[in-house]
Image: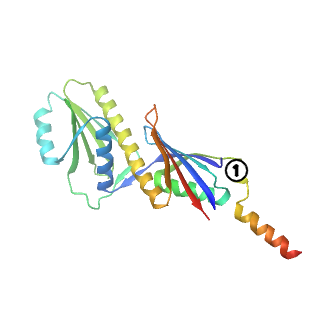
Amino acid sequence: MAQHEVEITIDRSGEVKVHVKGAKGKACLEYAKWLTEIVGKVKSQELTSEYYEPEVKSRIELREELKSEE
Amino acid sequence: MSTVLILTPVIISNLPAIAAAVAGAAAAMGLVAKESVKGQVQQAQQQLAEVEQAVSVELADSEVLAQGVETGREFVLTKGEVELRVSRDERGRCVVCAKGKGHTKAELKQMAEEFTQKMTQCFVYNRVASELKNKGFQIVNEEVMEDESVRINVRRWVD
């Protein structure tokens, strides 16, 4: 189980800042897309280092493949 | 961290959701809300037209869906001598009109703009809170900051 956290700040004019934490790669983009559909239009987006880290599920699959090769 | 996203709100909704945002903004700004039909407002407007200033502000990215919206229906809010009317124009956009005695056009415009901002914030909050709940997020913390922004921290466990 992985924990996904999102911090949403709605400023006084209604502009929304979304900070997705814990979700990596594709999962992170899925949250971004989902929240964009809810709120409106993307003004800016910044991908941080965690985005490029592999998802936990992928790591487990890799280990299994290595074992099967042995 | 993984991503930081800045989103500009677009209000496309039906009347009940707009009404909830209007009510939220009215409560936050100390306005008294009452519904009115356009005919009554027009009559009152004609009587007061000579002594009152009036300013209209349109929500740039807004669209009130016609479904379920009665023709001429609008929300009338009052605070002291100022009256704010929220309605749907011919193009379907949400318009806030401020009028009142003893205020300049600049003051009325500022009030209308403050209301549209607060209404937009309430609309976005209601929508986001509802969708987060549907998605299975748990609200960990929620607070109103000094600059009147609302911060919501949510968490979700996934397989």
- Say whether residue B59 is visible: no
Residue B14 x, y percent position in the rendering:
32, 57
Residue appearing at x 84%, y 76% in the figure: A68
Relative image position of residue B92 (x, y in whole percent): 32, 53
Does B82 sit above or below residue B11? above
Report the front residue among B113 and B35: B35
What x and y, as percent, mark residue B30? 27, 35
Q: Quadrant of the C terminus of chain A?
A: bottom right
Q: Which residue is mark 1?
A: A50
Q: Is residue B103 above or below residue A29?
A: above
> Colour scheme of this structure image?
rainbow
Up-down relation of residue A36 to residue A10 (above or below) = below
Q: Residue A13: in sight, yes or no?
A: yes
Which residue is at 22% across, 48% downward? B74
Query: In which quadrant will I find the N terminus of chain A?
Result: bottom right
- Residue at the spot 70% in from the left edge and 50% down from the top edge: A50
Q: Amino acid at mark 1?
A: Glu
Q: Quadrant of residue B101?
A: top left
- The answer to whether B83 is drawn above or below residue A39 in the figure is above
Q: In the image, is B58 to the left or to the right of A62?
A: left
Tell which residue pokes out farthest to the right in this image.
A70
Q: Nearer the viewer, residue A54 or B44?
A: A54
B131 or B54, which is in the foreground? B131
Please tell me which residue is depicted at 49% across the width and 56% down the height of the picture.
A37
**Which image quadrant is residue A55 in?**
bottom right
Badge 1 element: helix
User: Label 1: how many residues lie within 10 Å, few (<14), some (14-19) or many (20+)?
Assistant: some
**Parent chain of label 1:** A
In-image side of A48 versus A37 (left or right) = right
- Foreground pick, A19 / B104: A19
Instruction: Residue A9: give x, y in percent of width and height.
Output: 50, 42
What count of labels does the image hold?
A: 1
